[in-house]
Image: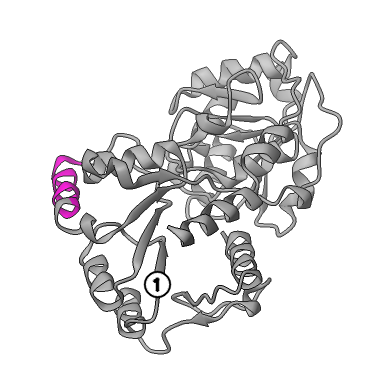
Amino acid sequence: MDHFFWAFNKKCKENNVEIDWFFPNTSYHGDYSSLNIISPDIEITFETFVINKIKGKYVTVFTHFIELCTSFYCQLKKETGAYIIAVDHNPRPLKGYPLKKRFKKRLKGLIYAKHIDKFIGVSEYTTNEILKDFGSGLRNKAFVIYNGVIIDDIEQNTIRNKTNPKFLVVSHLRVSKGIQDLIDAVNLLSDTIKENLRIDIYGEGPYEAELKKKVSQFKLETIFNFKGSVSNLNELYCLYDYMLQPTHMECFSLSILESLAANVPVITTNVGGNEEAVKHGENGYIFEVDRPKELSTLLISIMTGEKYIIENTRNLIKNEFSIDKMVESYFELLST
């Protein structure tokens, strides 16, 4: 979201719209120095800090990464009288919330949703989940604004290998990202297929040791290469033929958009907003979540050239999921 915050701030300044940014921590990297950032300097909950600082100063308030439909929104409306736009970036559990939590969310929707003027989901999936969580009565004020990426910064793949393609994974390394399923799927492959298979994994996280242990257990060290976190992924996508994302939970993945912008098709699961960007057989492939055997069969077809994506996947991102379009959509909300 860094690039969106920077671009949105620039758009506001160009149109003489004053904007303050409330963050839990002060940031200075990239273009954050151009933002007017207000952060707590003492130990205090972020929501309490915002309420104490924001009193009566603002016409419009956006919230990102804040839990929806809580007493915070009631206080925010009371202190500011502002038009409140709550943006939901959160994926939901694969099997949904437990009954008790579903009941609590519906109750919170009845009590606090009236204090939020617009709900924004970053995908159709997210917006539908908002209605499922807090009540279908919110339908008239729940909308979609897709996340976007900076197209021009992402280098493009110009030659895609039809057989023995090279794969990458871009992911935080935690259980919900399903990389363990990918390792299981690869383990099911024949030695002939494995011999030519290479998968580079970019990212770090708490599940990294377990994933490496599993790779070692199956003797797949020549296939999986853990590359850690890097700052130049925009230059690296183009070195690969396909991206693998076997995730169990997703809202709307920026790494999927970046990969497609690099003309690198995506192989991913049918969860969250994945199928809103990836069309099976057109710009990538969709497989059933938590089904290593299905993924293994798909990998065989791709490795042998039986399945092959011809389309330039960059065009969809340029037309539908650019950061410019995202910024314009959010800026238009200021006139509501």
**With 186 as the anchor, is 252 left or right in this view?**
left
Q: Main secondary structure of the magenta part?
A: helix
**With 134 as the anchor, is 205 left or right in this view?**
right
Q: Nearer the viewer, residue 225 or 250?
A: 250
Residue at the top extreme, as displayed:
306
Looking at the image, is 52 positioned above or below residue 76? below
Looking at the image, is 19 positioned above or below residue 91? below
Which quadrant is home to the C terminus? bottom left
Q: Nearer the viewer, residue 175 or 320?
A: 320
The percent position of residue 293, horizontal first and vertical second, equals 50, 19
Q: How many marks?
A: 1
Residue at the bottom extreme, as displayed:
42
Q: Nearer the viewer, residue 214 or 173?
A: 173
Residue at the right extreme, as displayed:
159
Instruction: Report whether residue 257 is seen.
Output: yes
Label 1 sits on what residue type?
Val
The percent position of residue 175, horizontal first and vertical second, equals 44, 44
Q: Which residue is mark 1?
A: 59
Residue visible at 38% across and 89% down in the picture: 42
Label 1 Cα crowd, 10 Å radius (few <14 / some 14-19 / many 20+): few
Instruction: Report whether residue 200 is seen.
Output: no
Looking at the image, is 25 positioned above or below residue 246? below
Which quadrant is home to the N terminus? bottom right
The percent position of residue 34, horizontal first and vertical second, equals 64, 78
The percent position of residue 165, horizontal first and vertical second, equals 76, 26
* Residue extent of the magenta highlight: 98-109
Q: Secondary structure at mark 1?
A: loop
Residue visible at 54% across and 77% down in the picture: 18
